[in-house]
Amino acid sequence: MLRAVAQKVKFGPRTQLRYLNVHEYRAAQLFQRYGISIPPGKVAHSGEEAEKVTKELGEEDVAVKAQVLTGGRGKGVLDSGLKGGVRLVNSPYEAKLYADQMIGHNIYTKQTGPHGKPISAVYIVQRVFYRREAYLSILYDRAMQQPVIVASARGGGDIEQVAINEPDAVKKFPVSLDTGVTDEQAQAISQFLGFTPKAIAEGANVVKNLWKLFDERDCTLAEINPLVETVNNRIMALDAKLNFDDNAEFRQEEVFSWRDLTQEDPDEVAARQYNLNFIKLDGNIGCLVNGAGLAMATMDIVKLNDGNPANFLDCGGGATAKSIEEAFSLILKGNNVSAVFVNIFGGIVRCDAIAKGLIATAQNMGIKIPIVARLQGTNYQEADKLIQNSGLKIFTFPDLDEAAKKVVQFSDIVRVAREAKVDVSFELPL
């Protein structure tokens, strides 16, 4: 279950390793500031602007690249009927034609899910002719507990697949936080990338500059795929991907001003307004927990009891009645949730305050599905009394494993009843 959630959010749950993803043209701007060569290019927000930008570049041989925060856009399908979010064109008119089929439309890839993602801009970039492609990225390695540079001379494609098919073609270079990337290390990486002798020095300089960007801008990922050697032996980044640590927002105001909320899940955006950390999953048991670690453990124990969590939700230490109601609104959105598991440890927030919020929410929202609550910690006895005296069908259990078993059992009963179109009426076995 931990792996499933980590895959869902790339580096882990938003409460532990948060990151901001920015559009390619924004990342390219930072590359340029840090001395990493990129092709001439400009962003356009309409077909007419794309045509104008192509003329301004003075090039007829350009790429029109949909600006959307998902992988696999080149093989994506748009609701306009266009196939591929990256197209090579030979005239300003063609740039306008393809931009009109991208901007204002949704693209569907393996990563977007059934709803796709909207495209509000395209990046018009001069086409570059090159002799070889490489892959270069910097990220944090949890196992090694330090940054690593990942390099491969097999760039331009799916690096994960390259790692599977040709494990020796992908190599990790650990980076010391004390020294950063040394000249010798940068040189070795540039040689491993397969550049010609004329380009080795510039390749090493790109490695050092990418590290400087990664370090100074609080990145969690800095990736170039492909990093190419041109026909005249110049090193150039033809793609740019940067993620930034959300905890560094106070230091990186400019970068965080580039956040595109249209690319994020609207429910997750709404959750942040109430200081909730929420991630949708595919199960049918809603989870409301305080603390990222406890939330992960709660989903694990639900899974161990043959249940399927519908979400990750950490209400934090400052949960209020309003935030609990908002949490339930997010959890119950749609019709797939058949039970809710509330697992709270009262440390910063008192259990009786959570119980009051839970009771008010159940009354205000008229919740019709079972709620299983496990409240431990400060004032948990008072919380249990409040729930027992509320007259509501909220089931409390002091033991985590017992509570998990019951919520899975209740969820199964409700799910079967729904399929049979029978009202359970909360006559559930205890």
Image (cartoon, rainbow, N blue to C red):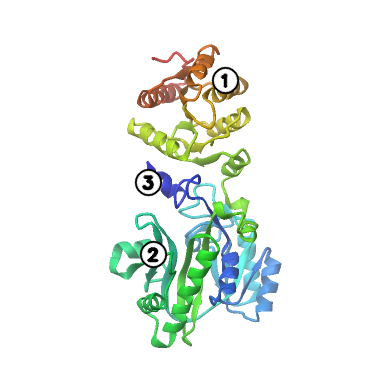
Give the number of the disc on residue 3.
3
Please report contact status of discs 2 and 3: CB closer than 8 Å, yes or no.
no
In depth, the one of 155 and 347 nearer the eye is 347
Is residue 424 placed above or below 292 in the rendered structure?
A: above
In terms of secondary structure, where does tag 1 sit? helix
Answer few, some or many: residues within 10 Å of disc 2's Cα (few below 14, many 20 plus, some between 14 and 19).
many
**Which percent across, then down, holds residue 210?**
49, 70
> Residue 359, labelled with which disc?
1
Amino acid under disc 2: Ile
Image mark for residue 225: none
Q: Position of residue 224 (x, y in %)?
A: 47, 69
Instruction: Report the front residue among 196 and 73.
Output: 196
In the displayed structure image, the side of residue 123 where residue 183 appears, left or right: left
Residue under circle 2?
Answer: 159
Tell me how far mark 1 sits from mark 2, CA to CA: 50 Å
- Asked if marks 3 and 1 touch (Cβ < 8 Å), the reply is no
- Asked if residue 367 is positioned above or below residue 59 in the image, the reply reads above
- Using the numbered discs, state the Cα–Cα distance from disc 2 to disc 3 in whole angstroms: 20 Å
Going from the N terminus, do you reach mark 3 or mark 1 first?
Answer: 3
- Quadrant of the frame with the N terminus: top left
Residue 166 seen in the figure: no
Name the kind of residue labelled 1 in the image. Ile
